[in-house]
Image: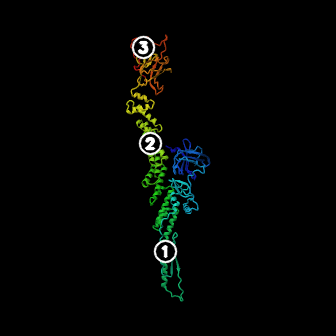
Amino acid sequence: MENYQRFQILSSARQDLFQPESPVWVSRCQLSRDLESGRRLLQTRMVNCSERTVRQVFLRIVCFGPSRERLTQLEMVPMQSLSVLPGRVFGDDKLVEVPVGGTVYTEVFAQRVRFSDDTVWDETDPDGYLAFRAVPVRPEDRHAETLAERARSKGLRNDCYFRTQQGLWVCTCGMPNASRSLRCVRCGADRLWLETHMDPNLIDAPPPPKTPEPAAPVIAAPVSPVTVIPAPIRDDPPPAQPTIIVQSVPEPEAEEAPPSHAGRNAAIIFGVLLFLALGAFCAWRYLKPYLRYQEALRERAAKNYDQAVALFEDLEDYRDSPDQITETLSMKAIGLMDEGKYQEALSIWETLEGCDKQVADCLYALGVNAYTEKDLEKALGYVEQLRERFPDYERTDTLAEYSYFSLGSQAVTEAAEAAGDPFLQRDRYETAKENFQKVIDLEKDPNSEYLKNSKDYILYCDYQIARSYREEGLLEEAIEAFAALESYQDAPAQRQACMFEYAERNLDNPTEAVYDYLEELANAKYPGAQELLDRLNGLGFGFEIVLNTGDPQATAATDLSKVAIRYSVEQKDADGAVLVLARCTLPDGTVGRGLLNANHESSGLKRWTDFPFPTGCTKSGTVTLEFYDAARGETEEALLETLQISFTYEPPTEDGTPDAGKDGSSEPGKDGSSDSGKDEKGRSVPETGKGG
């Protein structure tokens, strides 16, 4: 249907201009130029933020030039014929002309919105209907501090509470988003993270039980003057390795110096060495894993997820390393989704347990990307995966609906391009109908624009298929196809035309259908149908042209006053035979008219001079006789027969009479000679007098 090469995109950008009091939010604008007509056409993607069905929207369009200089502002631009349910995205399938030359950028706002219940929102009425009220977070609220801390950890705003309503979810920045959106269109916050961490209803939920930290082993002190005092174990994270404090125990003063004892000194040295060896072992056994654990946390905080996973894997079962691996991979997958790398994110989510929702979200996002890139078969492939693996996923039908509708539109375009090949056209139209029917089967909303447009497209395809039958000469198929369309466009007239063509084509070998078609057409006063039906029923009109009563039939004359018409009118009306009007046209342009059977006689002979026909023609040429059904006038539909006479003008002789034949007789045949089949000059003439 649309030729995308015909349009030049001037600007396409997200519009971060939200009116909290407006029931309609414009999220994106695209301005294009029609290369053929030069018109600027605007597409706007909008969201119904209200809890009512929108029927009509009036827009305010601010126009900017190439350097962002403001050109002008268009007020109350209508976008009509809508039926948008709460929370639905709409508008990008409708084009609005921007008649301001030089416009490159636009900003669009809703000025007035009319709902299906005939209520109206107007931006000039401050006390009118407010479609949406974000709930702000106040410092004195119970969870304000907790939510603020969590928001700071992700670099997000904490202006409003995260919540959901019909068809929408509200980000902590206060922006409403469509329910099918995975990220906030204003600040980019991830919806899944907000649902998990910023919902105040989940803050009071009891935290999951934590695995208690293993107590540090107690190291026995050797029997020696050196006392080993372990440092107290704290619960504050991260738990530090027990600090070993070596204190010398003073020996009691002796009155006399003890005697030197080499063995006792050796024992002391051995104890010190043993203590140092045990300390080194403890440092290697407990301090090293702790340091690597902290390094892994730092790598993850720096978004070096692969290095963090490798460090956690080296730690094996140290503390909660397995759980940290899962969390790190989840963070990596979320980051990939933020970057639009859904295939890489999908490969991670599928390795983690309990992540079916995230897997489904990735498949859906990949399908949306394929749909955006016009790879509709690939998009439907993701639809099949979602239906097979996640039959309860709520957005599968939406992606399928968009893809089937686009496939149908694509097939209609291909059919239009196949002009001149009726068979290929029908194949493409049939394919389009199948896809539009799938949209109808999926759509649950009776007011959906996709539902209405799909039904309209199916009627359009059926009409084009019927026309292709007629173009190919398959009249019976065309008659049946047009009949099924009932009153769509000019289907009734097309059906009648096909019926008449079929009757004309098969008049020599009429079937029962020919009689049925002609009777129906005659009752409907279809032009020419009654004549064909009369011919089919053996009714007709017979006319002959003769020169004088009893003379041979002729189609040539030199004296019109001697011409007579023998007629036979077989068709009957209420008064007898049809009343016939005769009209003659002479070579010099003179026209005469008269009734052939004024008393409704069915047959007879009438001389030229019985009509108010002119006889003094002084120009040779063709005399044309036309016979009409007098009740219907001198129209093409009322024409019964056309005959022609070849007239030769002969100037009068010196005595004032026309030039006679060789025998001097002015009336051939009066002398008893056999001049049958010859004219006044003795020339041979045809024996049949019927023209045609």
Q: Position of residue 198 (x, y in %)?
A: 53, 60
* Mark 3 in CB contact with mark 1 (< 8 angstroms): no
Q: What residue type is disc 1 on?
A: Ala
Q: What residue type is disc 3 on?
A: Pro
Q: CA distance from mark 3 to mark 1?
A: 153 Å
Q: Is residue 17 visible?
A: no
Name the residue beneath numbered marker 1.
Answer: 280
Name the residue beneath numbered marker 2.
Answer: 429
What residue is at 54 percent from the left and 43 percent from the top? 35
SS type, badge 2: helix
SS type, badge 3: loop
Q: Position of residue 560 (x, y in %)?
A: 46, 17
The colour style of the image is rainbow
Q: Residue furthest top?
A: 655
Name the residue beneath numbered marker 3.
Answer: 668
Q: Position of residue 508 (x, y in %)?
A: 38, 29
Nearest to viewer (mark 3 / mark 1): 3
Structural crowding at the residue carrying mark 1, measured as other residues with C-alpha within 10 Å and reported as few (<14), some (14–19) or many (≥20)? few
Q: Is residue 323 visible?
A: yes
The residue lying toward the viewer, choosing from 651 and 362, is 362
The residue lying toward the viewer, choosing from 626 and 346, is 626
Q: Quick one: label 3 or label 1, which is nearer the N terminus?
A: 1
